[in-house]
Amino acid sequence: MVWIVLFILTLDFPWGELLIFGAVLPGLAAPLGYRLFRGARDMKWARWTVRLAIVVGVPLALLLVCFGWIIPALGPPSTLQEAANRLRLAALQLFGDRDGWVLTGALILFALLFSSLGNKPLLRYADPAWYDDPRRLARENGGGAVFNTPPCWPLPPGKELPESFSVDRGKLTVEGDTLTVKTWGKAPRSFPVDSVAGVVLGSASGFNILYDKDRRALARFAWSRKNAVLLGQYLLSKGVPFVDLEGKAVPTQTPQPRDLPQCFTVRESRLCLVLGWIGLLFFGAGLTAALVFWALERDGGLLFLAGVCLLLVLLFGWMLLSYRNRRLEVDGTELVYTTAFGRTTSFQLADVAQIHWGVNSSRLTDHQGRVLARFEDNMDNAPLLAVYLNAYQNRKD
């Protein structure tokens, strides 16, 4: 059906329609056709079958298009031999030079790209059990690089948990021992907390999935949403286990201080160094080129470009300074914090009055509310620092 529509609609048409009918339509229709014709229920087999159908089908469809272009000029073929000759002529027109091969290859690549949009429906057909598995759901539904990064793990125990609260602007509500999920376009659904068999801790760009004893997903939440940490503490207080993306249990209790290293350093990772140098060299070269051409042509647009490059050079330069200087050194109960510009502050754990956990930025403040140190969860040893601070805070309480 796809190729018939392509053949009819692509006779003497602009290039935009060629992209639509030669790449978008086949790419979207190939996974649909696999399901309609009841292909084997194996996801690996399904993907390769769809790809093979696109790689073989797109050139055949283009060949039919070229054959259709010849008909208005020479008229319809009267014999089978004449049709075969015109088909050969169409093949020469399409694949006789480099442009035809480039066009065919580009359409195949676009079709393969658009076929990825049908991966989820294809997976639902080929492997429905894995499609509904909470471990898979926790890997997908992306919302950003640090969308689902916990502020600290294990979570500190909740001191006084409220009887009722809502998460993510009412999408998930807790009322005593009952949880209610509200999904757009669907009726609210409630279930008791006793029916929650566990929680899959999702990836940084995914969601955490609550599931029941039959491994059916009940609800989802992300750490970046309001009251998400409170929900995590609530689930822990109810004895709900947490598992990783492989289904293995993860520790939910804060280790004792004696079980943790007493001396370590929290600092920027090497990724900061690599990105800093790449950005500095790239935008530094752009700044130099923009200034040189501005000096020759006095074009205001080049001056604006130079200003943008200068800001980016300063940003990546700050990243290099952060990698070189910024760190938080822990030595027992003594902490030393150094900023990116080399300013050093020393303080004791007893001076820390509050820990402000954030999704991508946390800070320690003293009894007067002044910031003692800042750190991010992507820094080296940041998870260890979070556990260390939790352990000290629990011991102090």
Image (cartoon, helix red, strand yellow):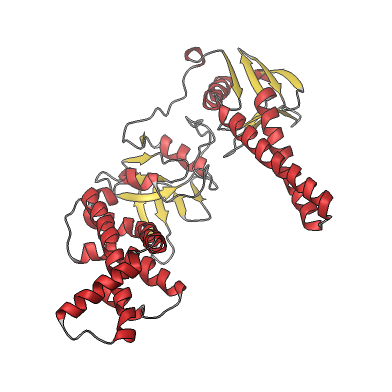
- Of residues 227 and 161, the one drawn nearer to the viewer in this rendering: 227
Q: Is residue 386 above or below residue 54?
A: above
Residue drawn at x 24%, y 48% as measured from the top left: 44
Left or right of 172 in this view: 295: right
Work out which quarter of the rendered image holds the N terminus and state it: bottom left
- Of residues 289 and 279, the one drawn nearer to the viewer in this rendering: 289
Q: Is residue 313 above or below residue 180?
A: above
Residue drawn at x 77%, y 57% as measured from the top left: 301
Work out which quarter of the rendered image holds the C terminus and state it: top right
Q: Residue 61 location in percent, x, y?
A: 29, 70
Left or right of 156 in this view: 13: left
Res 105 seen here: yes
Q: Residue 116 location in percent, x, y?
A: 36, 56
- Of residues 238 and 118, the one drawn nearer to the viewer in this rendering: 118
| Rendering quarter of residue 329 | top right
- Of residues 216 and 19, the one drawn nearer to the viewer in this rendering: 19
Number of numbered callouts drawn? 0
| Rendering quarter of residue 185 | bottom left
Q: Is residue 309 above or below residue 158?
A: below
Residue drawn at x 43%, y 40% as measured from the top left: 203
Res 2 seen here: no
Q: Residue 325 location in percent, x, y?
A: 69, 23
Q: Residue 175 location in percent, x, y?
A: 44, 50
Left or right of 359 in this view: 17: left
| Rendering quarter of residue 2 | bottom left
